[in-house]
Amino acid sequence: MSAAETTADPTVAEDAALARELADATGALLLELRDDTAPGRDREYRGDADAHDFLVGALARHRPGDAVLSEEGTQDPAPRRGAHRLWIVDPLDGSSGYGRGGDEWGVHVALVVDGTLVAGAVALPARGEVVDSDTVPPVEDTPVDPERGLTVTVSRSRPPSELRRLAAAFPVRTVAMSAAGVKTLAVVDGRVDAYLHSGGQYEWDNAAPAAVAQGAGLRVTRLDGRPLPFGADDPYSPDLLVARPAVHAAILEVLGG
Ligand SMILES: Nc1ncnc2c1ncn2[C@@H]1O[C@H](COP(=O)(O)O)[C@@H](OP(=O)(O)O)[C@H]1O
Ligand SMILES: [Mg+2]
């Protein structure tokens, strides 16, 4: 084997397929654990821990040279600082809903290469859904209808204060959902026009949803229009907007981004 063959990165399609496979397998583990446990905090904590151990172990086997940032892993930035390839994973997003036995929870697996989000997959196991950035179908960029207005999905527990400014500009219907992947896939499959969040999040909450959304042709930015941060020492991610380009532009115009 030549030196070039030993050092070449996998293709983006290969990384997206791996993200999908691992999100799906972690989801299967979580479904099994759910069925073997009673609703409550113990199920939630075991789900977080078991999904993290499985997913991080699988990444270490499949991509041994790559760095990993997981919600349940070390928060010390030193081992991942400056990494060429960084996996950002949330082994169980929407963990309290998982503990209670609902279906609004997911598994997020994303890859950042040299600071750029390149691939990702989101599984919603209780709904039998899994999508990845490479194979997700494109969304049609239909214009905003000013009469009909916009349907916006927001956090069930922490709705964004910007909704009031938006509702002053055009009719807005809000749909509360739990988990960042659940909300993002609702935009991807066209059930809602946008996902808007402010007041904080972390890179593991939005990296894989953002990768899938971008793969579908949606725009994903902060509320001032800047790119989301990925691979920073501090994984805090202040706010985000996910929408098809026409809707994204209309909302940013109102919010002043
Ligand atoms: N203001 C905030 N600060 C920190 N994390 C937040 C947040 N709002 C939402 N999140 C996180 O983003 C994810 C989706 O939240 P929501 O369902 O409210 O939209 C959740 O991840 P976890 O379930 O992995 O903790 C939640 O903890
Ligand atoms: Mg999360």
Image: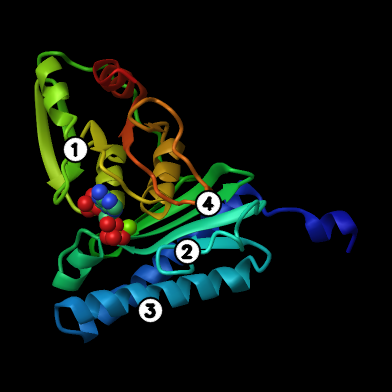
Distance CA(mark 2)–CA(mark 4): 9 Å
Instruction: Identify the residue under disc 3.
Output: 50
Which of the two residues, 138 or 205, is positioned nearer the viewer here?
A: 205
Distance CA(mark 2)–CA(mark 1): 27 Å
| Mark 3: amino acid | Asp
Q: Residues within 10 Å of mark 1 (few under 14, many from 20)?
A: some
| Mark 4: amino acid | Asp
Q: Single out the residue that lies furthest toward the right.
A: 2
Query: Which of the marked residues, 3 or 1, is nearer the chain's N terminus?
Result: 3
Determine if the C-beta at disc 1 is less than 8 A from ligand 1. no
53 to the left or right of 66: left
In the image, which disc is placed on residue 233? 4
Quadrant of the frame with the C terminus: top left
Residue located 71% across and 53% down the image: 9
In the image, which disc is placed on residue 160? 1
Which of the two residues, 40 or 132, is positioned nearer the viewer here?
A: 40
Instruction: Decide: is 149 above or below 39.
Output: above
Residue located 42% across and 31% down the image: 217
Q: Where is residue 214 shown, x and y percent of the image?
A: 44, 36
Q: Which quarter holds ligand 2?
A: bottom left
Instruction: Identify the residue under disc 2.
Output: 75
- Provide the secondary structure element on which disc 3 rests: helix
Quadrant of the frame with the N terminus: bottom right
121 to the left or right of 194: right
- Provide the secondary structure element on which disc 4 rests: loop
| Mark 1: amino acid | Pro
Q: Residues within 10 Å of mark 3 (few under 14, many from 20)?
A: some
User: Which circle, 3 or 1, is nearer the viewer?
Assistant: 1
In the image, which disc is placed on residue 76? none
